[in-house]
Image (cartoon, rainbow, N blue to C red):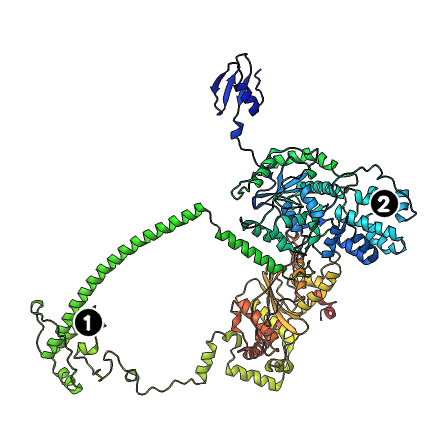
Amino acid sequence: MKTISPPLSTATTKAILSSPVKSTATADATGGTRFFSPTGGTLCLLLHIEDMELELPKRVYAEGLEPQVKKINNCCRMELIRDLKKAMPAEYDDVKIDPVFKHIMAIAENNLKFSGKLVDSFLCKQLITSKMHEKWFIFARKPLRFSLQEYHTVTGLKISRESSCDVIKWKSDGGFWSELLRTGGKITLQSIKKVHLQEVHSWSRRDRMRLIYLCVIMGVVMGRDEKVNIPHMYIKLVMDLEKLRNFHWGLHSYDFLLSSIEKVRKKLGKKNSYIFEGFSYAFQIWIMEAIPDFGEICGSKVSDSFCGPRCGNWKGVAKVSYEDIIQLEESFTEKGDLFSVISVSGNGDVLRDADYTRKDEMEDERVELLLDRIKKNFDWSNTEWPVIEDEETEMEEADTESEADKSVDATDIAADVETSSVHVAGRGKRKIQDEGAESRKKKLLCKRTAEKKQSIDQETKSFIEGLVHSSISSLGDILRAQMASMESMFKERIGNMEIEVSQLREAISLRAEGSVPKSKTDEAAPKTKTAQAPAKKKVNQAQAQAPAKEKDWLKNGIETNEFDFGLSTQELRELSQDTYVDGFDLSQVKVENSKPFNMSPPKLNDEEIDRAGEASADAALVYLRKEDWEKVSTWLIKSKPLRIGPSLLDAEIGTRLMDRTEWLHNSEIDAMMYVYRERTSLKRWKLHRVAFMSVVFSNMIKKEYESFKAGIRKYKLHDLLVQYGKGVLPPHGQTQEIWNVDVDRLYVPVHVSGNHWIALCISFVTRSIDVFDCSGRKRYKELDGFANLVPRIVKAVQPPSYQKDFTFAAYTVHYVPMGKLNKSACDCGVYTIKFIECHSLGLKLSMVNDGNIKEARHRILWDLWEAANDPELVERMSNYEPPECLTSTVEEIL
């Protein structure tokens, strides 16, 4: 049997080489050296260890492939601390000044919010090492350490373990907590919030203070789930405040946070949400301290001269998206600050403090390599970090599962218990004021992006310089060749032109003298002095006496292909009309001489005026012929009501449309939406997959949204809204077209703020809502109903097999820039109708403005009158039958 000895250390290798025993060395195919001992025996393959580079720790996910989640169930509950302040303000103030948890409670006082997306993104950037008591992460290819040293710097909690032999002893005082310990009762944060907070007024002051301490410990420092029983050990500690202050809360909570991070890592990429226990705010603040750019995005420091644990010096909404995180990482350069290690004394100055060393810590040479490179300010920009494989992940999880469980105390959450969810920051979640948060974020991201574009490595710079130089050289050669070719061609053509002009001059001169042209050999040099043109009478006589043969020769001479247009008329001489004017440029012709004598200034008669208006760009929106206007005027005088879809066109509507000081009402706007539906159904408009809703629909959305907000989980979609999604409603001009199946976008008129009309274009394809508002405002609370209820309607009307592919996520609202229109403050309804017409037909919205809005009113009246008298529409209206869904709910709709 062949035996291979294990690799030898460098010291062992040197000992063998320096040994007096003679050995034989031969080259090995691997690049090492084989040494044979004369005693027979052992074959040793010695590797050159000093030439081997240690591998770097592997990251959990490759760069740019980190998964994203919809929400994190954060168990660190700052809102509970604020509830305690309201219920027990005096006791709260006493606990707040206790140095043990003073800076922890300052997080709630400063109102720093939790960013689940920031925490989740960093949990996906972990580096796998053998260390038991510290975690490593990576950002912009640079490593960051999260150890007990960083945790203590952030929280200031005690980390030294003292003798705890007396912890289990407690003295009964007959209060609430004494009775609970005596009877072995159970209590949770959930029961405290729902039951005991309403009863604390009957407790003793000491028991109320103990309650606050327990809530801070269990709900923030340990970050346990609200349904988990509070360990009796914690209750016994708060029975004696001296023991409470001497307990190593920093070490205890840090170990629990690490175990929670390890649990979460195993769930990454498998679910859209997960539970995160532990002091999550400490982890977030460490990120904000280690990478100051995130600190600037998520909030701001309370004071630049703050001294103490860093968790007490931050405030802000912590509103950051995955896109912001990715953009910042991609644009991060060497100019950006990043501190791989931080300590109480500063950032990056102490790599490993002996006070934070754990006796049972595992050694890992890869971590030592990272620390060594951090100390030497290593350039990580070109470092390619290895990625852990799926097989390695499964094996690593199997090996560490039992160890992770041991690090958590016996009060850990049961596997089948769900925590109450704290959603990741989304639309409408950040109500607190943080002035300048968005501007700070945009300014920082723009700055980092600009720095990234400015920084070009030397290799790329050399490549670009070479490319530009070669391009310019090649372009110069091409231009020189083209210029030489053009110069040669130009000289040749100029020479030909000079010969032809000389021939033409000679021909004209010979004609005037009554002789025949000479040959080229007898050709005389052209005259340099210009002769004065003869009088008009003499010219006419010469023309009459010229023989026909000479005229033919003149015609052939003038019709040459090349002609020198730089010559003046006097140089040509013998022209057919007199163009000589003393003291004037003889090569020009007077404009008045070229105008017919009988021309009068142009005027448009009525018919021409009508054609001019009909050909204008905005004719389809505002133009109205004279005879059409007379028809409408005649009808207004007679005031005969006409049925137009859901409305009755009468003198009242006509008066509102004629008077610019009148606002439009629901009836005329719904009537126009009906006309648009019929034009589309009858193919008079070449529109595809478009629907036009009514004001009734928008009013119902606003009404139903109030029920939706009252109880989102219990809310059931109204059946009438489902009928809108199926095309059964609006009842007049119903299309029977299903949203997202037959229709891609909706147009909806909406009445907002009680005094204003706007138009919406809701796209199912882009999941967005475009807002057209002539006033130029940027926020209407009424649109939240459309953003939240429309996705529910779309999902409800889809075929059952496809409904699972649709979500309830709210649509994005986009306000289209319109400028400031509607100076009369009475035309918002007209703008709403015309914006819908323009956008649906693909016309520019700027075609409707304050300059033609009056004509737009008249055109709307004509469109309604014309539709009410359209034979095809009259027949369709006469055959109208209300759908079954309206038989019992007509009153509710109206």
Q: In the picture provided, is 692 more to the left or to the right than 539? A: right
Q: Which mark is residue 559?
A: 1
- Residue type at numbered disc 1: Glu
Which numbered dot is residue 136? none
Q: Amino acid at mark 2?
A: Asp
Residue 421, horizontal then vertical, whole percent: 73, 51
In the picture as drawn, the residue positioned furthest to the left comes out as 522
Residue 320 visible in the snapshot: no
Residue 174 sits above or below residue 888 on the image: above
Left or right side of 767 for 884: right
Residue 323 spot, x, y in % from top left: 59, 53
Expressed as whole percent of the image width and height from the top left, the position of residue 442 reads: 58, 58
CA–CA distance in space, label 1 to label 2? 120 Å
Number of residues whose C-alpha sits closer than 10 Å to that of mark 1, classed few (under 14), some (14–19) or many (20 or more): few
Residue at 87% of width from left, 53% of height from top?
205
Numbered disc 1: secondary structure: loop
Q: Work out whether 40 lies above or below 263.
A: above
Coordinates of residue 561 in the picture (x, y in percent): 21, 68
Circle 2 — which element? loop
Is 716 in front, or is 799? 716
Q: Is residue 652 left or right of residue 524?
A: right
Residue 700 found in image quarter: bottom right
Residue 128 visible? The answer is yes
Q: Residues within 10 Å of mark 2 (few under 14, many from 20)?
A: some
* Residue identifier under label 2: 240
Q: Earlier in the sequence, mark 1 or mark 2?
A: 2
Above or below residue 153? Residue 509 is: below
Task: Judge by depth and name the residue closer to the eye, 350 or 123.
Answer: 350
Q: How many marks?
A: 2
Front tag of 1 and 2: 2
453 vs 185, nearest the viewer = 453
